[in-house]
Amino acid sequence: MSSSHKHEARIHGSKYPLINRFQEYLGEFVYGGIDGSVTTFAVVAGAAGAHLDSAVVIILGFANLLADGFAMSVGSYLSTKSEKDNYNKHKAIEYWEVDHLPEKEREEIRDIYRAKGFEGELLEQIVDVITANKDRWVDVMMKEELEMSEETKSPVAMGGVTFLSFLLFGFIPLLVYVIDYSAGLEINLFMWSSVMTGIVFCLIGYLKAVVTQTRVVRSIIETLLLGGMAAVLAYFVGDVLEKFFV
């Protein structure tokens, strides 16, 4: 085994339970960060295109940051909770069928493993072992018949991770405007906001590559392009609307 594979095995092993637990939520953290940075930077870009003051940019940015972040966290919570509820509902049905229709359920187990190539006495032994324990029996039915896996992530934690990530990454495009409002800066605010947000896009692209197991460079470029296109669109929309209404 190569040194890199050994390092990966150590990280994914039980020696680092906190890291393993964080990895369960890394995907949600990344996608919350993508939405937070892209949508907030789009608001900043639209405001810059309309040549609005820093105070207005801050108001619009924080309104988007809190409202959209909360909405995303609620959506993540409800989605995860729905998956858990759906799994538990079907699991309760399987328990009822095992209790009230045991022969039918035994035959379903037999059909499942016959389709896998088992037959004769070995097939019957497998059926006997599985059906000897009700919990094991139901677990096999959930995985093999219904093709459902139990959601182990907490809905509350999923919502919290999404909200935290949205706020953390979404605040970066606003940071230079907040500093300018409180201290005053003789710089191009939108340019520096763009640079800082670009760095955030690179970081998120890297984390997305870790989650999706894709090429890092490709993931970074993809994130930069998508975020940049959203910002360019918002900038020109703000510029056009400013000419009409201001």
Image: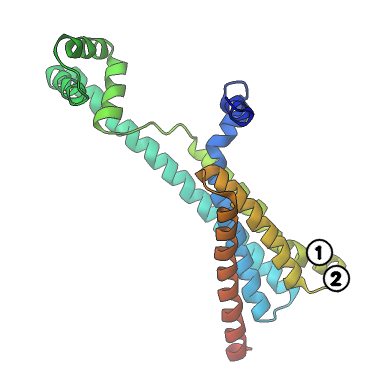
Amino acid type, label 2? Leu
Q: Is residue 206 above or below residue 185?
A: above
Sequence-wise, the earlier of marks 1 and 2 is 1
Badge 1 element: helix
Q: Is residue 120 above or below residue 108?
A: above
- Residue 131: quarter of image: top left
Badge 2 element: loop
Location of the C terminus by quadrant is: bottom right
**Badge number at residue 185:** 2
- Discs 1, 2 touching: Cβ within 8 Å: yes
Give how far apart the Cα atoms at labels 1 and 2 are. 8 Å
Location of the N terminus by quadrant is: top right
Residue that lies at the very extreme toward the front in this rendered image: 2
- Residue 235: quarter of image: bottom right
**Badge number at residue 10:** none
Q: Which of 8 and 101 is in front in this view?
A: 8
Q: Is residue 147 left or right of residue 222?
A: left
Q: Badge 2, how many Cα within 10 Å: few under 14, some, many 20+?
A: few
Residue 230 place in picture, x, y as percent:
56, 69
Residue at horizontal 36 percent and vertical 36 percent from the top = 85
Give the residue at mark 1.
179
Task: Evaluate whether residue 67 shows in this view.
Answer: no
Residue at horizontal 53 percent and vertical 43 percent from the top = 211
Residue 49 place in picture, x, y as percent:
65, 79
Residue at horizontal 65 percent and vertical 55 percent from the top = 202
Q: Badge 1, how many Cα within 10 Å: few under 14, some, many 20+?
A: few
Q: Is residue 131 above or below residue 199?
A: above
Q: Which of 111 and 88 is in front in this view?
A: 111
Q: Name the colouring of the figure.
A: rainbow
